[in-house]
Image (spheres, grey):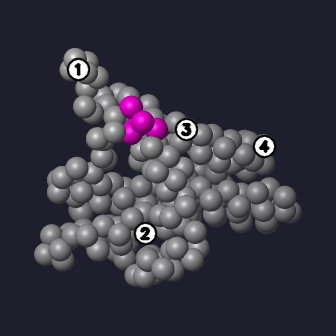
Amino acid sequence: MPPSSQPATPSSRLLGFYNAVPNLLWSALSLTPLTIFCYQHVARPWLYGFILVSLLVYGLPFSQFWRLQLSTNLARYKQLGVPRLNHFTQHGTFVNWLIRRTYPQYRHVRSRAALASFRRTTYYQEQFHLVLFVFFLLVGAYAVGHGEMGWAALLCLINLGYNLYPVWLQQYLRLRLAASVPKSEQTTPTQT
């Protein structure tokens, strides 16, 4: 049997492509209605203020994220269906399944260093979705204040799916990782 010319692991470019697709899809579905509402209905000074207030969340240190933790029990996240979200996200079940069809030995987390990197990434992703959660919340409140109840309901629904559940997903993933890593090796990354 001749040796395969197929590399054992996918290129970083291919991994980037596979993982960008769900990001682009969810972002387009969620940010398009928000953008339309902001463009058509939100007065610019309010919009700039909402952006500024939302960006303040980036100042929250990762060491304080435990205060926002929904639960320390994996079962609570499972009751809310949080793990199902991981099927349709970057590095999620579906993306990994697609990659493993061609590269069966591929694993996103292959070493302790990769595990630590993945854990750090969960903090950055949670932070990103917290910033957007606050922004959606402020814009949704603005919609309610201006009698745009249909828009407010849509923005609330999008905020739940695009921001709150992804925040919970990052918390859930860290809890799962904590169960597999000794306490002495667990640290909270610092922000730079």
- Judging by the rendered image, the residue that carries numbered circle 2 is 172
Which one is earlier in the sequence, the residue at label 4 or at label 2? 4
Q: Is residue 154 magenta?
A: no
Q: Secondary structure at mark 3?
A: helix
Quick check: 183 left or right of 161? Answer: left
Residue 186 spot, x, y in % from top left: 20, 71
Task: Give the Cα separation between the discs numbered 1 and 4.
Answer: 64 Å
Name the magenta segment's main secondary structure.
helix
Closer mark to the observer between disc 4 and disc 2: 2
Q: Which mark is residue 24?
A: 3
- Judging by the rendered image, the residue that carries numbered circle 4 is 40
Which amino acid lies under the numbered mark 3 shown in the image of this protein? Answer: Leu
Q: Which residues are magenta?
A: 98-102
Q: Secondary structure at mark 1?
A: loop
Residue 148 spot, x, y in % from top left: 84, 59
Which one is earlier in the sequence, the residue at label 3 or at label 2? 3
Q: Secondary structure at mark 2?
A: helix
Which one is earlier in the sequence, the residue at label 4 or at label 3? 3
Q: Quadrant of residue 1?
A: top left
Which one is earlier in the sequence, the residue at label 1 or at label 4? 1
Which residue is drawn at the image coordinates 21% and 70% (left, top)?
181
Quick one: label 2, few (<14), some, or many (20+) residues within 10 Å?
Answer: many
Which amino acid lies under the numbered mark 2 shown in the image of this protein? Answer: Tyr
- Judging by the rendered image, the residue that carries numbered circle 1 is 1
| Number of numbered discs on residues | 4
